Amino acid sequence: MQKQHAIAIIDSGVGGLTVAREVMRQLPQEQIIYFGDNARCPYGSRDPEEIRYFCLQMVDFLSQYPLKALVIACNTATAVALEDLRERLNIPVLGVIEPGARAALSASRSGRIGVIGTETTIRTAAYERALRRIHPELYVVGKACPAFVPLVEQQLQHTEEAVRIVKETLAPLHQYDLDTLILGCTHYPLLTSLIAEAMGETVTLISSAEETARELSMLLSLQDSLATARGDGVEHHFYTSGDDVTFRNIGEAWFGCHINVQRKILEKAPNF
Amino acid sequence: MQKQHAIAIIDSGVGGLTVAREVMRQLPQEQIIYFGDNARCPYGSRDPEEIRYFCLQMVDFLSQYPLKALVIACNTATAVALEDLRERLNIPVLGVIEPGARAALSASRSGRIGVIGTETTIRTAAYERALRRIHPELYVVGKACPAFVPLVEQQLQHTEEAVRIVKETLAPLHQYDLDTLILGCTHYPLLTSLIAEAMGETVTLISSAEETARELSMLLSLQDSLATARGDGVEHHFYTSGDDVTFRNIGEAWFGCHINVQRKILEKAPNF
């Protein structure tokens, strides 16, 4: 593995930009090559076989770059495609579920942990399994929030409607006396302030995005493959299967700087 | 590496119990074998060669147990002995410095980070190097606090004298406008409330103990060597080169439960 090779990040859309931003902040010497499959977003209610196929398509395309690690920056894709991609690729593959689970275990004092995510993420109980594999005696409750991703993808997070939807969706969680809530979807950090307000001050929110960047840092460090300073700076590349102008608008608002976005249409998948 | 093998933790004394407690909390299925070199504590002002020799003595003794990982739960020992132990042992060796550095990078928004530790830890600038290796553009300031470890080892942390010493020692740090302070010594989490009061609310304290337990969890998970449930529970073993009654008192106060402590005198080291 070469130190100056890039880190590939794949996601169903713009949610993985939260992971990309954390990687840029925590590992500013690393180059990122990102693919957002906006044309087929959201993944949350799709067939697992179909999601695995989509992930392989993105990875195939990104393999034109020399890569040293792959981050699946989508909880749904991590839940269904992580093992498959780990078997197929000869570079380390990180998902966002285990980092989030470990951070929640570190943060929770009462052992009462909530997970919010897409329907598929919650249905696969991937967080619950990751948590219980490490610590069998936890109280874990999951809640699917299918309305959240569209709010972000349609840039509605600053509207009154978003406030109402977030509040109503999370209200049933109050009965469980949680002290920690995992944002089990990489779109959700874009709704952090609304979620924090809906849950109240006593609940610690865990962003898988931050945690995944940190575990990537640990992994590169352990393998002695952290990038060193580049004389000409770092140039990241972003690809989307959807509309590049929308993607650029969301990305630039999130990063606060210009980003280089290209549209790349992926072949239609077979029927699943 | 066997899943049910133990995790060895070595420290200059009782400071590493903060790491042990976090490992127990975050990884309750793992067995811990601990060695505290209280008879020769503190390490903070000793010769690096001597510290490496002490670490090897502890590891040699603990090798009677089947081990799957070693944690050097002492910042001073990590600063001078980590590389040496990594080369000599065929199990993963974790120190406490890199986990603390990565957590600080994740927590800091302003990039103005302070490090407190023993004289040797600060003199070797081990945190500064770990931080800059990942992120070259940080403001890092170190402050040696040689009076802190004796406060903990002599169980004086709840006295007025401790409040005064902590406040006076940390006062010079206020001028640097830090947003994050690394507790770069595993004894310091036992002084957390005093340090938090002295630094003020705007400074996030990073405990290497918590972070190291979390990175251990990640490492075991990546290597698929997390322990599975044990029918007869987990029995930890604690050894000290010093007084076992004092060690047990400090340990039981810290864990809130009975612990099994044995004294083990190590051979006198050659002169360094």
Image (cartoon, coloured by chain):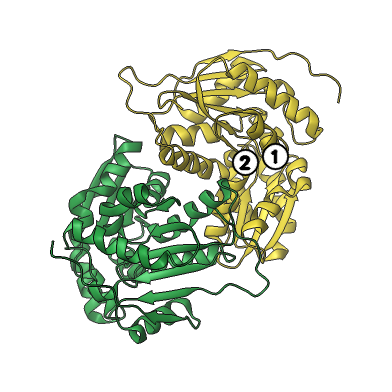
Chain colours: A yellow, B green
Q: Is residue B211 left or right of residue B112?
A: right
What label does residue A148 carry, if any? 1
Residue at 50% x, 16% y: name it: A260
Residue at 45% x, 43% y: name it: A218
Rendered image quadrant of residue A248: top right
Residue contact between numbered discs 1 and 2, judged by CB atoms under 8 Å: yes
Q: Does the image show residue A168?
A: no
Tag 2 residue: A188
In the depicted structure, whether residue A30 falls above or below residue B151: above
Q: Please, what is the three-letter code of the amino acid marked with disc 2?
A: Tyr
Instruction: Mark 1 vs mark 2: tell me if same chain.
Output: yes
Upstream in the sequence, badge 1 or badge 2? 1
Few, some or many residues within 10 Å of mark 2 (<14, 14–19, 20+): many
Badge 2: chain ID? A
Secondary structure at numbered mark 2 = helix
Q: Please, what is the three-letter code of the amino acid marked with disc 1?
A: Phe
Few, some or many residues within 10 Å of mark 1 (<14, 14–19, 20+): many
Q: Is residue B113 left or right of residue B22?
A: left
In the depicted structure, whether residue A29 falls above or below residue A138: above
Residue at 27% x, 42% y: name it: B129
